[in-house]
Amino acid sequence: MSAESMTMSVARLRYRLAEHSELVTLISFALLFLFFSVAAEHFLTPLALSNILSFASILGVIVVGVAMLMIAGEFDLSVGSTFAVASFVWALSMNAGLAPLPAMLLALLVSASLGALNGIIVIRTGIPSFIATLGTMLAYRGIARALGGGDFAKYTESVPFLFKILNGAIEPVNRLFQPAGNLRVSIFWFILIAVIFAIILRRTRFGNWVFATGGNPEAALAQGVPVKRVKLIAFTLTGLLAGVASVMQFSHRTSVDPLRGEGWELIAVAACVIGGVKLTGGVGTILGAVVGMLLLQMLEQGLVLMGVSVQVFRAVAGLILLLSVILNTYLLRAD
C-alpha cells in the first residue's frame, strides 16, 4: 500500500470515528475489560461483574442527565449536592410520618426545582453555567448539611415495598451463583432511563433542539429553536435525575450523610467526556456517556481487585479523561 493510500485510509477512519465517537469508548472499554480479565484474579466472577453494574447504575442515572445538559452546551456541577438534598428530604419526610410514595415525590420535586433554579440563574444572568452551578453546588451542600443538622438521617422502620421496587436485590438470580451476585433492580431502572433519553435525543424534535442549542445557539435561535426553554428543561431534567438516583440509592442504604454524592459531579462529567460528549456542546450520545460510566466503574473495581489503593483510581481516571479529550480534539479537527 502506498503512503498516499495509507494516509487516505487513516483519514477515512478518523472521520468515521469522529462521527461515531462512542465507538472509541466501546473499544477502550473492551481493551480495559480484557486487561482486568487477565490481571485481576476475581474480576470475571459474577459478584465482581454484578457489582460493576449495580454501583454504576446509581451514578449512571445522573450521567444520563449530565450528558444531555452538556450536549445542550451547559454544565451542572451541583448534581452531587442535589443528590444529597433529595436523600435528606425523602428520609426526613418519612421519619415525620409521610408515606414513602408521597415522600419520594416530594424529594423528586425538590431536586427538579433545584435543577430548574440552576437554569433560571444561568438564563437570566448570563453567568457561565460552570461558575453558576459551582456556586449552587456549595449552596445546595449547605442545605443538605442544614437539613441533617450536620449528622446522618436514617430510616429505621420496616423496609417499604417501594424500596424493593426501586433498588431491591434480585435474589432469585443472585442465588444462582456462588458466591452470590449483587444484581439489583436499579440496573433495570438505569437501562430504562438511558434508553428513554437516548430515544428523546435522537428521535424527537426536542432532541434536535438540544443538539442545535449546544452546537450553535445563535443559529438555532434564528431557526426558531426556543434556546432558553431548551436549556431550562435540560437543567430541570438533570436535577430530577439526580433525585431519582438519590431515592434509588437510599432505598438500598436507608441512610444519608451530609457528604453523600460529594465529587460525583466531576465523575459524571468525566464519564461523559470519556464517552465522547464534547465539552463545548452539540456532540455526544447517551450510549457513549453510559459506556464511559461503566468504564470508570470497571476501572475502580478492577484496581481494587488487583490490590491497588482506591486512591489511585482518580489519578488513573484523570489520565483517561485527558487522553479522551486529546483524542476527541484530534478526531474533530478539521485539517
Image (cartoon, rainbow, N blue to C red):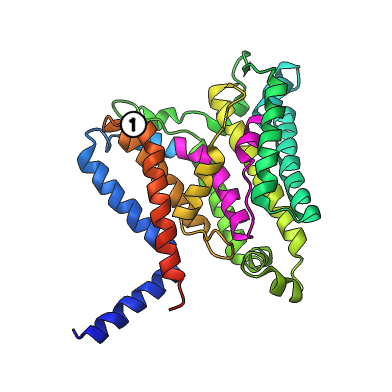
Asked whether 66 falls inside the magenta stretch, the response is yes
Question: Viewer-proximal residue, 269 or 128?
Answer: 128
Which amino acid, mark 1?
A: Leu
Residue wearing tag 1: 47
Task: Check the image and report above or below for 4 versus 98.
Answer: below
SS category of the residue bearing label 1: helix
Let me know if residue 298 appears in the view: no
Above or below, 284 against 141 in this view is below
Characterize the local packing of mark 1: few (<14), some (14-19) or many (20 or more) Cα atoms within 10 angstroms.
some
Where residue 189 sits, quadrant-wise, is: top right
Q: Position of residue 186 (x, y in %)?
A: 52, 37
Assign the N terminus to one quadrant of the image.
bottom left
Tell me what residue is drawn at x 47 percent, y 28 percent. 169
Q: Is residue 160 above or below residue 265?
A: above
Write down the quadrant of residue 251 in the picture: top right
Describe residue 284's horizontal placement relative to residue 206 as left or right. Answer: left
